[in-house]
Amino acid sequence: MIRPHDLVPYPLPQIRRAIPSDLASIVAIEKDSFIDPWEITVFLEALTYYPTTYFVAVCDGQVEGFIVGALEDTGESIYGHICNLGVSPMYRKRGIGKLLVRRAEHQFALELATAVQLEVRISNITAQSFYKRLGYRHVFGIDQYYANGEDAFVMMKWFRF
């Protein structure tokens, strides 16, 4: 029988801003996580344009998760945009994705965003459930959003100040 005090919690990862030397690890996680992974050039471009909203999770000295965020100014409001999130398969279900999302949300709020949006595959029920637990809600759908023609849901979370 396992008792609560017998369980050893996973150590918390270090969440820090991404740097160019992280890109090889980020691309490897991406390829393990998605059916149509981003190319390294897209990750590098995102790092160039959005260095303050791009984070990695470091566990035992290795990058094991990442989040790519962007800021979008509509002229009336500023929104955070979660463009990509990935965690190494062996490090999933440890709260790393949640920590990355929370860190990005914090940065978005610091940069005066009033909400955060993201797109998720209609077939990706696991991701939708994850984001719902973090306070995101379905807003609308986008037909044929992904390269293979699959539709997406746009999900949003509004900040309360």
Image (spheres, helix red, strand yellow):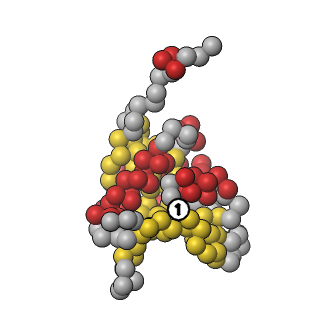
- Is residue 45 depicted above or below 99 in this figure? below
Q: Position of residue 39 (x, y in %)?
A: 52, 62
Residue at point 42% right, 47% down? 99
Residue 89 found in image quarter: top right
Residue at point 61% right, 54% down? 129
* SS type, badge 1: loop
Q: Position of residue 26 (x, y in %)?
A: 47, 51
- Is residue 125 depicted above or below 99 in this figure? below
Quadrant of the snapshot with the N terminus: top right
- Is residue 121 depicted above or below 19 in this figure? below
Quadrant of the snapshot with the C terminus: bottom left
The amino acid at mark 1 is: Tyr
Residues 40 and 151: in front is 151
- Say whether residue 124 is left or right of residue 114: right
Q: Say whether residue 29 is visible.
A: yes
Residue at point 34% right, 58% down? 106
Q: Say whether residue 42 is visible.
A: no
Q: Position of residue 107 (x, y in %)?
A: 32, 60
- Label 1: which residue? 136
Which residue occupies the extreme front position in the image? Answer: 161
Residue 53 found in image quarter: bottom left
Residue at point 55% right, 16% down? 3
- Is residue 65 depicted above or below 85 in this figure? above
